[in-house]
Amino acid sequence: METTLQNSKTLHLYRAKGLELFYKKGYFDTSLKEICSSLSISEKAFMDTFISKEDFFISIIQNLILQNTLNLLIEPVSYKQSPFPLILDRVQIELDEAMNSTTDNGFILANFISEFNTKNPRVNKYLADILKIWEINLISLLRKGQLDGYVKREVDCLGAANHIISSYIGTRTLMVEGNSRLLADQYIQQLRYYFYSISSSYGK
């Protein structure tokens, strides 16, 4: 049992260091030699553990990038509650965390989806599936909001979810180079206006 725990901790450390390297340099610009140097292991030991650079990255997707995106998800509630403050609060928390990071290079998931687009269908499917989880979560919240009387009946929940996601990704991308505080505040303000426009009178 102790050996299993030690191995688990070691693998988590390897993945965390690997993600840091890929996030900073990009997957295709990071060599196997650089990865092994960062992990302080030989290339043979790396191959024995992860088989390939691609499989190593997929293990990072399944563990760390998935968890990073799950932070944006909102637990459904059984009672009537407007989805808008819940979404705003969750997004604000993630934006604040990004602003306080000294190594922010944008939204991790979106960065890698963009990098792998048309280059590696296997990896891109793993990434797209994670994005789909976020989309489904938002759709569920908005549809429940419609049933509870907070969201206008005519609102296309899929379209609204994609609007929230795409505008968030765009803001996170701009925050890397621009005034992150101003951009974050502007995004939250515009998101409030958007939510107001799709709210029913009952939810105002």
Image (spheres, rainbow, N blue to C red):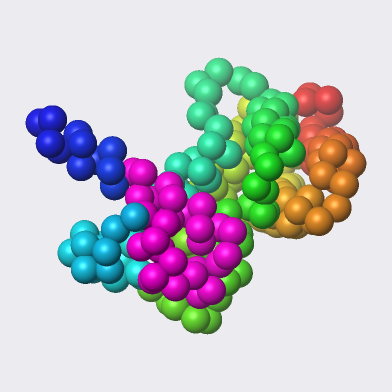
Occupied quadrant, residue 113: bottom right
Q: Residue 57 in the image: x percent, y percent? A: 39, 62
Instruction: Name the foreground residue: 128 vs 174.
Output: 174
Q: Is residue 99 visible?
A: yes
Residue 41, compared with residue 194, is above or below; it is below
Q: Quadrant of the N terminus?
A: top left
Residue 39, compared with residue 113, is above or below; it is above
In-image side of 163 versus 190 (left or right)? left
Occupied quadrant, residue 110: bottom right
Q: Residue 104 in the image: x percent, y percent? A: 67, 48
25 inside magenta stretch: yes
Q: Residue at x 53, y 74 (%)?
A: 29
Q: Is residue 57 visible?
A: no
Q: Residue 69 in the image: x percent, y percent? A: 52, 45
In-image side of 7 versus 118 (left or right)? left
- For the record, the magenta segment spans 12-39
